[in-house]
Image (cartoon, rainbow, N blue to C red):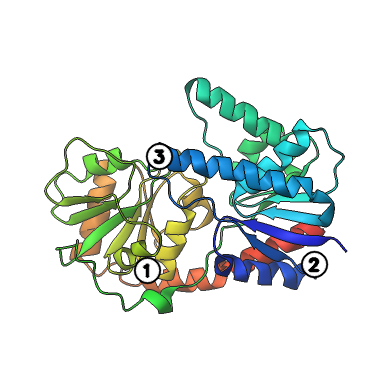
């Protein structure tokens, strides 16, 4: 009997609740195959190693594809590169392939043209059955950009595991000297230049955690940290006054994990609009705050958070919204319902 698997670029525990959701809806007995390629993105060597791993691991599964029915790629490249091998070798379709949390950001220059050719090669043809994205607008955009029927898209919000109980009593990191601070964290699709520019005239402390943002000058009340990965991020989030996500390109799905972690940690979340995050997750003034990308919006919301009790209720609302709508098991159930029709 053929197996049904999730190829995961993370430890098995991270996808346990997703598997629970999938198996409750499908009775397909999905198993997790954990092969960690993304140990970190610091340095060109690690980036090259990561992508070589994606090609090597998927080629091994390509060679034994007769053993599998459904193949889900929790890291999208595990599913995409598997289909790339199928396309290159022009094999008969034998598997039902699902890409989870698909995202594509166009790159410039020659490398950008190669990247788009690669993505089109992976996505074209019949090898991929479904593509999960968290936004209908993003599904529409990808459908146009890659000429993919909308019927192949599964639109449902991203989901994470609830770690509030594990981290709620964490002490404030030693690197933070301020009593209260606003946190901006993440490396993909963030407009930190806008945030720095908007922070002029604000007296409160801003902490940015990113290993790719390299400003020439930082104001005295802005702290940039570039060496925090994995579990190290959670004490920074749980002890912050608020979390802000300044999104660069609003059409791209990114920032979901930071946003949902912050919601689950009862944080006041500030998200720039328009963006996929603002569309799919935030009800302005209820479970988070939406702002336009201008200085006055940033100044007003920071002033309201620090000098009034206007938004004190948002943290509890954010957590309740997370528990009801954005768990990883619910994400698995929705995907499971979609793939079995």
Residue found 75% across the figure and 31% down from its top: 88
Q: Which mark is residue 168?
A: none
| Residue 232 left/right relative to 120 | left
Vertical order, 326 against 120 (above or below): below
State how far apart marks 2 and 1 are (Cα): 39 Å
Q: Secondary structure at mark 2?
A: loop
Q: Say if mark 3 contacts mark 1, CB within 8 Å.
A: no
Give residue 81's quadrant in the image. Answer: top right
Q: Say if mark 2 contacts mark 1, CB within 8 Å.
A: no
Point out the tag, 3 or 1, that comes first from the N-terminus.
3
**Mark in the foreground, 3 or 1:** 3
Q: Which mark is residue 248?
A: 3
Point out the tag, 2 or 1, that comes first from the N-terminus.
2
Q: Residues within 10 Å of mark 1 (few under 14, many from 20)?
A: many
Q: Which residue is mark 1?
A: 314
Vertical order, 259 against 193 (above or below): below
């Amino acid at each position: 009997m053929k197996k049904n698997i999730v190829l995961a670029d993370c430890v098995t525990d991270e996808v346990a609740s997703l598997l629970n959701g999938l198996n409750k809806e499908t009775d397909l007995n999905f198993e997790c195959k954990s092969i960690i390629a993304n140990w970190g993105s610091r340095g060109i060597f690690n980036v090259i190693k990561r992508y070589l791993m994606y090609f090597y691991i998927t080629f091994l599964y390509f060679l034994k594809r007769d053993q599998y029915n459904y193949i889900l790629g929790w890291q999208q490249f595990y599913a995409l590169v598997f289909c790339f091998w199928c396309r290159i070798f022009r094999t008969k379709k034998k598997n039902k392939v699902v890409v989870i949390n698909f995202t594509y950001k166009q790159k410039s220059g020659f490398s950008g043209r190669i990247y788009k050719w690669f993505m089109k090669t992976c996505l074209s043809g019949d090898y991929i059955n479904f593509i999960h994205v968290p936004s209908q607008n993003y599904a529409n955009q990808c459908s146009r950009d890659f000429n993919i029927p909308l019927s192949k898209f599964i639109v449902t919000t991203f989901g994470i595991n609830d770690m509030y109980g594990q981290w709620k009593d964490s002490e404030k990191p030693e690197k933070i000297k301020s009593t209260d601070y606003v946190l901006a964290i993440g490396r993909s699709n963030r407009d930190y230049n806008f945030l720095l520019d908007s922070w002029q005239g604000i007296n409160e402390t801003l902490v940015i955690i990113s290993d790719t943002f390299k400003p020439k000058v930082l104001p005295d009340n802005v702290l940039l940290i570039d060496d925090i990965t994995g579990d190290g991020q959670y004490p920074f989030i749980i002890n912050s006054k608020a979390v802000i996500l300044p999104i660069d390109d609003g059409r791209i799905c990114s920032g979901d994990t930071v946003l949902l972690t912050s919601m689950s940690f009862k944080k006041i979340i500030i998200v720039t609009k328009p963006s996929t995050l603002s569309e799919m997750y935030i009800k302005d003034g209820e479970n988070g705050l939406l702002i336009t990308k201008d200085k006055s919006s940033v100044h007003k919301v920071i002033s309201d958070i620090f000098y009034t009790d206007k938004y004190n209720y948002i943290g509890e609302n954010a957590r309740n919204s997370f528990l009801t709508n954005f768990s990883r098991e619910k994400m698995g159930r929705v995907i499971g319902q979609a793939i079995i029709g």
